[in-house]
Image (spheres, helix red, strand yellow):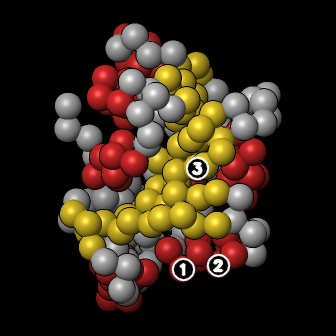
Amino acid sequence: MILRPDLAIIADHVDPGARVLDVGCGDGALMAALRDTRGVDARGLEIDPANVARAVGRGLPVIQGDADLDLAGYPDASFDYAILSQTLQTCRAPDQVLDELLRIGRRAFVSFPNFAHWRVRLSLLWGGRMPVTRLLPEQWYDTPNIHHVTIDDFRAFLAGRAVRIEDAWFLSKGGARTSTGANLLAEHAVFLLKR
């Protein structure tokens, strides 16, 4: 199974045998890979009922729920990792969701599209309209992305909340790139966090 590049990074860095909660797990692709290649005990929470059905069809323990509403019921430190991949920017209260992730998981992976990428900036500058790109394909009125976060925004947000960055990866065109100039040059970011 070929994973999306940010999911592949996460899969490569989850300890074998770990307990994982994948929040916004989609169709369960990451959970299935972790189960099959790392022996991980993975659980999922997904808002879209069609994705829940696909994940359950893969034999995965996924429940329908909303990251903004349904994380409070999980006990403290009940997972080794809490994962939020390409979901942060769709949450109504991303600050609260991040607090819940770091309460539930001993560590948290967070990945998101970087809205400060040069193509997004150029689209706004020259076209004067919200960008539609390969990685952000929806029109402004139809996008699930309600918080347009940048890498620098996220770093400042974490610093203000005493959250430690254990590692970070930056992606462009599906491949890894260095952290130099990442806010301008990276299309996606993946952070491993700990409180």
Which corner quadrant of the image does residue 80 belong to?
A: top right
Q: Nearer the viewer, residue 7 or 141?
A: 7
Q: Quadrant of the C terminus?
A: bottom right
Q: Which residue is mark 1?
A: 152
When the figure is inspected, residue 15 is found, relative to residue 40, above or below; the finding is below
Marked residue nearer the N-terminal end (3 or 1): 3
Residue pictured at 51% horizontal, 74% vertical: 150
List the residue tagged with mark 2.
156
User: Which residue is farthest front?
Assistant: 16
Residue at horizontal 20 percent and vertical 38 percent from the top: 2
Relative to 156, 61 lies left or right: left
* Number of residues whose C-alpha sits closer than 10 Å to that of mark 2, classed few (under 14), some (14–19) or many (20 or more): few
Q: Amino acid at mark 2?
A: Ala
Q: What's the CA distance linking mark 3 and mark 1?
A: 18 Å
Q: Are marks 2 and 1 in contact (CB under 8 Å)?
A: yes
**Can you tell which mark lies on residue 108?**
3
Q: Residue 185: x, y in percent?
A: 32, 80
Q: Is residue 55 left or right of residue 164?
A: left
